[in-house]
Each structure stands twice: as C-alpha cells, then as structure tokens.
Image (spheres, rainbow, N blue to C red):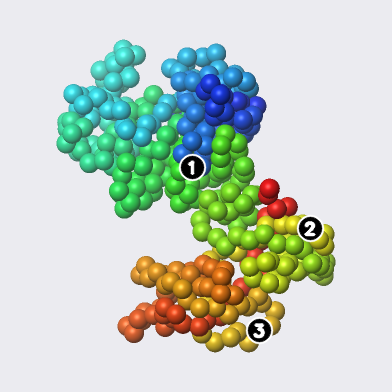
Amino acid sequence: MIGSDVDIDGVSKYFGDFRALNDVGLSIKKGEFFSLLGPSGCGKTTLLRILAGFESPDTGSVSFDGSDILSLAPNQRQANTVFQNYALFPHLTVYENVAFSLRLKKKSRGETASRVKDYLKLVQLEAHAGKKPNQLSGGQKQRVAIARALINEPRVLLLDEPLSALDAKLRQHMLIELDQIHDKIGITFIYVTHDQQEALSVSDHIAVMDQGDVLQVGTPHEIYESPATNFVARFIGETNLYDGTALSTEKLPGEEIEYMVELDIAELGRIRVTTVDEVQPGQRVSFTVRPEKIVIAKEKPLRTDINTFQGLVDEPIYSGFQTKFYVKVNGQTTIRVIKQHARYSDEGPDIKWKDSVYVSWRAGDGYILGPQEP
C-alpha cells in the first residue's frame, strides 16, 4: 500500500455569506502524516470533506498524484475517512464491520477472511472479532473504524478528530498506536484536530488554520519555535507575547547572518533578542518567549548578558512534573514561567506564593514574529 501526493490549489468555500475557506493552497507529500490544526470553525473539517468528496469547493482544484479528483464520486477517490463518532454498524460484529466494504465489492470469502484477519491484527483486535460495537471500549471502536477504512487500501486516509471522544490517557495511547499504524502502512494521513499536542506529537507537517485561512505550514518544530503570526504563537502551546518597538539593530559577527535587536516593550521595558531578519530602528514588531525558556530564581542572576526582571509570584500551579508560575512584573505585567522538576524533592517547592523572584532568559531564547499585526 502506498500513498498519494495531495495538492490543494486556490480552494474557497462559502456557506451562504459565511466564508469557510479562503483561497487555500497546500502541498502534501506522499506518505506524510499531515495535520490540519485550528480552533472550531476554522475550516479544517470543511477542507477534509472536500478531499473526501462530501463537499464541493466554490473555486480551486484538488489533485491526487497530479490528477484532479473533484469530478470523482467519494468512492472513486482512493481516499477513506475515519470519523469522530466511529460510524460503526451496531448490529454487526467487529469482523463484519471490517469486512463490509469487501462484501459490497463481492470479494471471495477466502480473500475477505484473509484480509480482515490481517487488518484486525494490524489494529490488535484479533481476539475481539466476534464482539458487537457495544461490547467494545472507545479506543477499540476507533481501531475498528481505522481497520475498516484501511481494508479498502486507500492511498489517502482522512481522519476527522478521531480521538476527541476518548479520555485524555486513552487519547494519548491511541495517538501512539495511530502513528505506529502510519509507519507500518506508509500511506498519506491527513489528520484534522483542534488539539495542538496531538498535532505536534505525530505530524510530519502541520497547517495552522483560522477563519478559513492557512496561517502557517511547517514542521512541528518550526511551528512551535518560529510562529509566523500572533495567532499561531498563542494557539500552539503557551507563550508570553508582547508588542514592542525596535530601538537598535546590530549585526553579530560570524558566518551566519544574525542580528542583536534591542526592543522597548511598554509592559516590561528594554529587552534584547537575536533574529536572522534585519529589523529597522523604529519598527513595530511582536515578540514572544516560551514559559519553559525562562529561568525563575530567588537570587538575582550573576550574568549581565541576559534579560532579567524582578517580580512577585502571583500564582504557582503545581502539576507534579512541573510548576507553572505567574509572576507579576512592574506591578502589572504577568510573565508565565514553567519550571521542570528534574530532581527528587521531599521538602516541597522552594519558590512559593508571594515570593520575590527574578525571571530571566537569553536573547537567543526569544523570538521576533515580524511586523506587529493590526
């Protein structure tokens, strides 16, 4: 089984006056695990339904391996869909659910039995072949739905929020299983989710969407470390995000082009940040620094080449493996800091509520997103 290249060019879709998709263009490579990520109503499911053949775009084209598919019926597209609600037949057994499409195609009993056995083994459900859906857990039902979609040997598997009905621990377990299945069969997975952690965990590339627009396409690392817009920075993980004005720009020595920029941020004061893009003095930009990149301590750091601010712990939130601190700086601005608990401690946290602390980060750990968004 092999995957298909998927090319989406200039796709727009309206429902009455509502714009669901706005001139969307994406190029998805054969065999990729590609995620469409965004909040509810951003257009990701509409785009998936267009790929599946359940909706038609108002403009644009969609092709698999260079061949336009928009004129093809859903069952002719070599794409199958795994739905959020499983869509299993309640009166059929697991075996019968998985075998259903093969029986519609009038495959022989021997071929059907052999293929169903293979796909039940793939999703680790051989022992449950005779059960009805109401005898299965949520995770098992989802695996049946995946096996039923894969037995048709599609080139593209479309997954519409397939894990959202599961509890957090089971969702994490199923996500690993889904990634392993993808690695085994090698077809193109296009995965719709609003859960940033799901997308970051398994994707080769992610398209972040909002209000019908694709805001950024990149690897999980690129999306997280180098967000293209304020929305992407806020939506992917937690961050501290500010608007500021560039005061000065200095080109740093070395073979790679890099600049040290001094910013004036109203809520904080002056900070320094490195960037590969030249920023002109007087330019308004957005700046972000992730909470886990900030160091929190009771003593003032000895280093002078870092951004350091004194503040008061407004709220500590202990989560076992880490503590998230909300630190009030300048009496008004809250900086979020995440401290990992890498060592055993039987005395409890050393930084507590209302403690006076210093927060600091290196210039290279912040990021300038670009010109300030209106």
Q: In this rendering, is residue 31 above or below 328?
A: above
Q: Circle 1 is placed at which residue position? A: 39
Q: Which one is closest to the eye, mark 3 or mark 1?
A: 1
- Which circle's residue, 2 or 1, is located before the other in the chain? 1
Pointer 2 and pointer 3: residues touching (CB < 8 Å)?
no
Dot 1 amino acid type: Pro
What x and y, as percent, mark residue 260? 77, 68
Specify the quadrant of the image occupied by residue 94.
top left
Q: CA distance from mark 2 to mark 3?
A: 28 Å
Dot 3 amino acid type: Arg
Q: CA distance from mark 3 to mark 1?
A: 41 Å
Dot 2 amino acid type: Gln
Q: Which SS class for mark 3?
A: loop
Q: Residues within 10 Å of mark 2 (few under 14, many from 20)?
A: some
Q: Residue furthest front?
A: 331
What x and y, as percent, mark residue 232? 58, 49
Q: Which mark is residue 283?
A: 2
Task: Please report the residue visible at 62 percent of the width from the left and 44 percent of the height from the top.
Answer: 216
Task: Please report the residue visible at 23 percent of the width from the left and 28 percent of the height from the top.
Answer: 95
- Which circle's residue, 2 or 3, is located before the other in the chain? 2
Q: Is residue 78 among the parts visible in the rendering?
A: no
For this view, does 255 lie left or right of residue 347?
right
For this view, does 167 lie left or right of residue 7?
left
Q: Residues within 10 Å of mark 3 (few under 14, many from 20)?
A: few
What x and y, as percent, mark residue 365? 63, 67
Specify the quadrant of the image occupied by residue 113.
top left
Task: Please report the residue visible at 67 percent of the width from the left and 59 percent of the height from the top.
Answer: 243
Q: In this rendering, is residue 294 above or below 346?
A: above
Q: Which one is closest to the eye, mark 2 or mark 1?
A: 2
- Which circle's residue, 3 or 1, is located before the other in the chain? 1
Viewer-proximal residue among 332 and 173: 332
Q: Circle 3 is placed at which residue position? A: 303
